Amino acid sequence: MTASPSPTVGDRRDSVSVWVDDVLDRARTRLPLCAIAVGFPGSGRTGLLNVVSEGLREVDVPVSVGMPTGGDSAGPTVVLADDLHTWPSDLVARMATMVDAGTIGLIATAEPRETDPILRAVLDLARRSATVLDLGTMSTADVLIHAARAGLTLTPATASQIRRRCGGVRNVVTAALLAIREEAAAAGLGETVDEPAVVERVARDHHHRLLRGLDPTTLSVLALASSRAPLDPESLAETLDVPYETAVEALDRARGTGLLRGADGFVSAANDPLRAVVGNRRLDQLRRTSVAVRLRASELTVDDALHAAEAGIEDPRLVDTLLAGAADATAARAVVLLRAADRLEPGRDDVRLLMAQRALVSGDVDGAGEVADLRLESARPTEKGIEHWVGIAALVAAQRGLGSHAADLYCWLGPDNIAAESLSAVTALVAVGDRASAAAVAAADAGRPPVGARAIRSRAVRGLLVSVCADHEDGDDAVGLVVRGLTSAVPGGRDPSIGRTLHAATALALNSGDLDAARALRKAAGDSAAGALLDAEIALTSGDLDMATRLLPDDEPAGAVHRLRTHAVRLGLARRNGDSSALAALWTGAPALLATTEIDLYLLRPLAEFWQAAARLDVTASIDRHISAADRLLESVGNPVTWAAPWHFAGVQAGVIARDAELATERQRLLQGVAGSNATASGLVAAARTWMALTFEPVGSVDDAQVAAAVAALRLRGLTWEAGRLAGIAALRTDDPGRSAGLLETARSVDADRRRPRPVDGLLTEREAEVARELLQGFTYREIGARLFISAKTVEHHVSRIRRRLDAGSRSELMAALRAAGYS
């Protein structure tokens, strides 16, 4: 079938056919007639009126194109009025009176007009007999149907693109399809048609013709819409310097063109034609005037400020608006806003500081480091606010794996100048074992007014300091202080220091065997990028290998430290799963990661995973210098039990794995030396002694009571995978079938405990838990978003994360898991 640019009744949807039939029936039976087809330019209004005109002539109904000059004895004349919105108002008013009196019938077409009172009166007459037809725009399905009739086969994606570029306007879509068909017919064998380019050309030509026919005021309204300026009549009147009524009429005309959609959003395909018709100078002038109007009214939005900055408008209030918007925006949008602000006022300190902070949040470590270095190059420690720049530079150094440089930055700043950065400073200084400098920062902070935020922060500071006290024997005190400090007032998700702080705190909790504290800290991280890696580390430590696999981020993280931690989890999973080939493949990248990262206290656990993986692969010699560096770090702070005991226990495990009795014995000696009277560390000593005996001593040298005590000690520290492994080794090392069965049962019990689902609240963030409850009540994503004041897309992302964490494949599995967790 050959498509035609002029619509026919057969080409229209059912509603159009019904409308035409109804109009013709009314005219034939001499019923009162007032019918109007409303549509945008190009919707086929004129062609439709021609179809009706032919039908009227076929049934001998008197027709007049325009107002009739006389009467007709056979009945009232039917007036055909195309583009009624362009007719003089007095003529339309007189016509409406004659229609209402039955003197004439009227069949008309018009663009949409919401504020024209006379045209609305005619529309009200048509509504009495339900003869108003809204031609609307085409859907993607309509485009596909028309394409098939034109002999074209399109994908839904191509049809959707055609609809968008043509604004869904029927005649423009038809012209685009015909042009594509003609290009295809003219193409040589094997040549393809650039369909998007053809559509773009047709749409551009249509928009250009349409815009050329508009009056200057309507063009100005569309120009303002293209820059996303507000289109309320008051703003328009002031911006265009026209009376209020004129602004209302111009806005009505602009909407009638079909170039404004939704909330008066300008059709993007018409941007280039608009620029060609209006001119860049006039566009810039209108944008500047609009911004000036909004500045006078103090109604400037963030988008307004961004567009004004892009247009080259300079005003300090623009910078303030952009800065305020960036504080609450996503990382990517914040960077755009801040760059615009920096162009307006280059070198403004608060703008560049926030720019560096948001760059860090978005993973742009190098970008943040460049800005910080530039600021600190000629800075003095006593400058007001310089501590925040030092904080940025220290975070950059830490993410690059240069913990000593981060500590040096805070030492350069001095304890008296650190102020609000005290927690970050202590975190950095404790990491490298600089206990004296950390204590000086804490002492200086303690001398400041004890406001709420500082009092809460000081708990975490004291906890970190306690953890590196060599004579400290109760690690739980340190963990408790840190948890109470951070969970009371953890930095916001947009604060880049949150990742470093929570990594340090969680490492402390895991080293102390307090998984509940680690989970509480992880929950405080919210939806930040730091949280996902913490999830995986906690799951690996607790022995939940399936959960660790699901929660490990897929994307390669930014920063050397995050890459090292992620690789450590992967190595740990491969080793625990007994996957030697995967372990060997992963090891190829391990030495390079270790070479680029300084080991600090918070990285001892990841390094332990590297150590044990190397022992399994018999390549321990390749990382001996990193092991020695960790030993020297611990010795520099007196081997504090919280950090040293788990490290030396990992050394015993490495010796056992490598069947290196000398290494295991040496690490056992060091472990016993630092454990002292610490209860939980003493449990590690017993577990290490039992494990060594099972590996290096004759069968029967370890009794069931020793194994049970060792298993219990490991379980107490949350090391359930290690506990099950130890019980399994003990079962294989006995010749007594009864003892072997009992030990195997112990191993199975530990494994069952490891795999037992725990309350979902331990894994879900607070927001995810809210989404879960709403989901179980039967609300849709859109409804949940409205109830929680987030977008439906954000709800979808939350549900996807919940699915991964609960290993729920289908919706029914997800719902069942959530109900089982008590969310119903």
Image (cartoon, grey):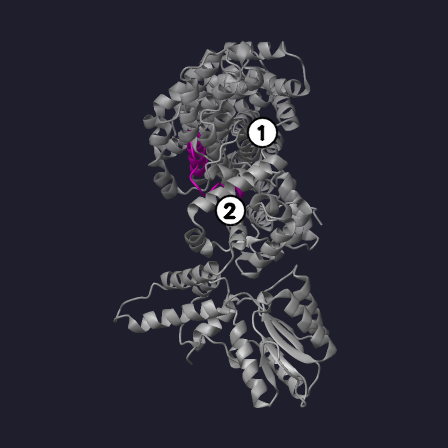
- Whether residue 568 sits left or right of residue 426 in the image: it is left
From this view, report whether residue 386 is shown above or below residue 305.
above
Residue 418, given in percent of the width and then of the height, sits at 54, 14
**Any magenta on residue 487?**
no
What residue is pinned by disc 2? 227
**Any magenta on residue 559?**
yes
Residue 676, given in percent of the width and then of the height, sits at 56, 15
Q: CA distance from mark 1 to mark 2?
A: 61 Å
The residue under the point 47% across, 54% down is 268
**Which picture quadrant has residue 18?**
bottom right
The residue under the point 54% across, 31% down is 323
From this view, report whether residue 608 is shown above or below residue 46.
above
Q: Which mark is residue 7?
A: none
In the displayed image of the protein, which residue is found farthest to the front? 69
Of the residues shown, which amino acid type is indicated by label 1? Arg
**Dominant secondary structure, magenta:** helix
In-front residue for pair 257/267:
257
- Nearer the viewer's eye, disc 1 or disc 2? 2
**Which picture quadrant has residue 592?**
top left
Residue 217, given in percent of the width and then of the height, sits at 54, 52
Of the residues shown, which amino acid type is indicated by label 2? Ser
Residue 762, given in percent of the width and then of the height, sits at 63, 38
Tell me if I can see residue 649 in this picture: no
In-front residue for pair 468/182:
182
Q: Which mark is residue 717?
A: 1
The magenta segment is 547-572
The residue under the point 63% across, 11% down is 448
Neighbourhood count class around disc 1 (C-alpha, 10 Å): few under 14, some 14–19, many 20 upward: many
